[in-house]
Image (cartoon, rainbow, N blue to C red):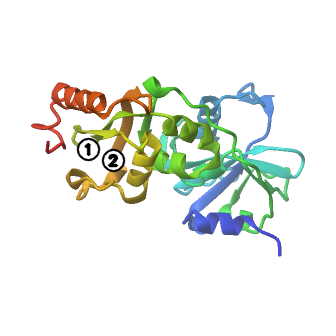
Amino acid sequence: MTLTFASIIASAGLDPAAALVIRHAYVREHEDGTVGLHGDSSDEEILAYTSVQVANHRIFPAQPPGVWIVFRPEGGDRARLWSVLVNHGETQNDGLRRTFHLEHSELMSDLRNRLVIGWRSPRTWRIHATTAAAYPVMEIADAEPVRFPGFDALTLDYPQLQAVIREHRYAAWRTALSSVIGVYLITDTRDGRHYVGKADGAENILQRWAAYATNGHGGNVELRNLDPSGFRLSVLRVFDPATPTREIDAAESHYKYALDSRRHGLNRN
């Protein structure tokens, strides 16, 4: 049984009737002189290019749907997923071209640059998702490893924390986080309140953060009744696992005082 794009669309929770599918072509310059795309186009360039469409309603829908699934070309009959965009509506129309406000979404984000489908009409560059649903899935490539940025530059929102704990592409991150203990910070981005925590003794930072990824609160009473989707995690200071507990306790107390997380944050002690 052939796996089709319909299964991918369904797993993303998308209604095919409410989505448009676009497969760009690599053309450095169009006949009218406008700049096109090429293999080295940046994400910003592709987004800007996608946001401008012709005003001719025979070529592009008069009322395009709210979700655009965008592919890059790959070979004659293949298309590789670039991103899924949310269409917030038309912002400009000069009679020749229409500009739309498009933003990246998290839909199918784990399949970006990995999913390849067969494209049955090479000359057709946009179709309804109801049509694309029947297209075969040709490949789902292994995810490329994500470089660990270093402890000083590390910040994770909650969905990325869950990805770090679960996905193969973050293996280097897990190795780094499992090699240290230390003091970390959780910020509730909805109101700016801080929670200062620590991982010490036999528990490294990876183990501590895995608990947050599992239940959102890691056993902390202060966080138990909060929605973890707005959490942002970062590392304040790392220590070698052989460091005495009293040094880690002192560092934790210092950051609680410096960030005033007892009076105006989420720490109770």
Residue 28 visible in the current orientation: yes
The vertical placement of 183 against 9, above or below, is above
Total number of numbered discs in the rendering: 2
The residue closer to the viewer here, 118 or 269, is 269
Whether the residues at callouts 2 and 1 have beta carbons within 8 Å, the answer is yes
The residue closer to the viewer here, 267 or 19, is 267
Residue 237 place in picture, x, y as percent: 36, 27
Residue in the image at 55% along x and 37% along y: 173
Tag 2's secondary structure?
helix
Q: What amino acid type is highlighted by mark number 2?
A: Gly
Residue in the image at 49% along x and 44% along y: 90
Residue identifier under label 1: 190
The vertical placement of 229 against 40, above or below, is below
Residue found farthest to the bottom: 1
Residue 101 place in picture, x, y as percent: 49, 41
Tag 1's secondary structure?
loop
Residue 35 place in picture, x, y as percent: 71, 26
Lower position in the chain sequence, tag 2 or tag 1: 1
142 relative to 238 in the view: left or right: right
Image quarter of the N terminus: bottom right
Q: Measure the C-alpha gap from mark 2 to mark 1.
A: 6 Å
Label 1 Cα neighbours within 10 Å, binned few <14 / some 14-19 / many ≥20? few
Q: What amino acid type is highlighted by mark number 1?
A: Arg
The residue closer to the viewer here, 197 or 148, is 197
Residue identifier under label 2: 230
Image quarter of the C terminus: top left
Residue in the image at 47% along x and 43% along y: 206
